[in-house]
Image (tube, rainbow, N blue to C red):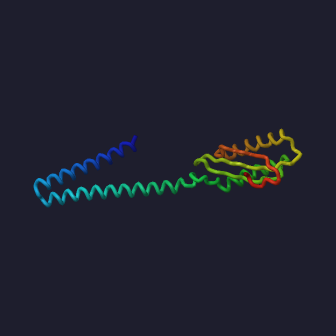
Amino acid sequence: MAGGSSVRVVVAAFACNGIIAVSKFVAAGITGSAAMLSEALHSVADTAIASIAIGVVLALVATFMSLETKSLLIGEAASSEMVEGVRKLIEAEAAQSCVIRRVHAIRTMHLGPNDVLAAVRIDFDDGVTAGRVEHIIADLERSIRRRYPEIRQLFLAPATTEQVEPR
């Protein structure tokens, strides 16, 4: 795995730089050389700067990733084109069957990049039988899933005229 080996290389580099810095401090202490002490401090500064640079890069990557995935984390709604497309499919069925009064609400939420949940409340004519409602809902599910395969979770629920908003 490339990611694991990269981490090992970075850790090994820091360890080697630490060993080099310690050996320079020991040499400076034994010899009393100001130049060696300067080299030891330079090694520590290089390691510290590299650590800070790596931290900044990690923070920037984390910020970028959080901005890119924020909408998925909070449940972004599907595009307005998809919502209107679903509405038009239901309205086409309403025109054909003459038993759908109106669509009360369409609520959508992305569960993943290509995974959408949709919940639709539909007002059917009061005189239609439960069997006919089931048949129409099954037809609607097929046509919606065929047109929008990214809608993986689809809930079509009959509603009364008074139930304008889903609960």
Quick check: can you spot residue 98? no
The residue shown at (52%, 55%) is 68
Camera-side residue of 8 and 160: 160
Q: Which of 147 and 17 lies nearest the eye of the viewer?
A: 17
Residue 7 in sight here: yes
**Disc count in the image?**
0
How far across and down, in percent of the image, does residue 25 sit? 18, 54
Q: Say whether residue 70 is left or right of residue 100.
A: left
Q: Position of residue 66 (x, y in %)?
A: 50, 55
Q: Residue furthest left?
A: 31
The residue most toward the right is 127
Coordinates of residue 131 in the picture (x, y in percent): 83, 38
* Most foreground residue, 5 or 62: 62
Residue 49 lies left or right of residue 93; in this view the side is: left
Which quadrant: the N terminus?
Answer: top left
Give the image quarter of residue 45.
bottom left
Query: Relative to 32, is 11 above or below?
Result: above
What residue is at 78 percent from the left and 55 percent from the top? Answer: 164
Q: Residue at x 69, y 46 (%)?
A: 147
Q: Position of residue 127 (x, y in %)?
A: 89, 45
Looking at this view, name the residue that lies furthest to the top.
131
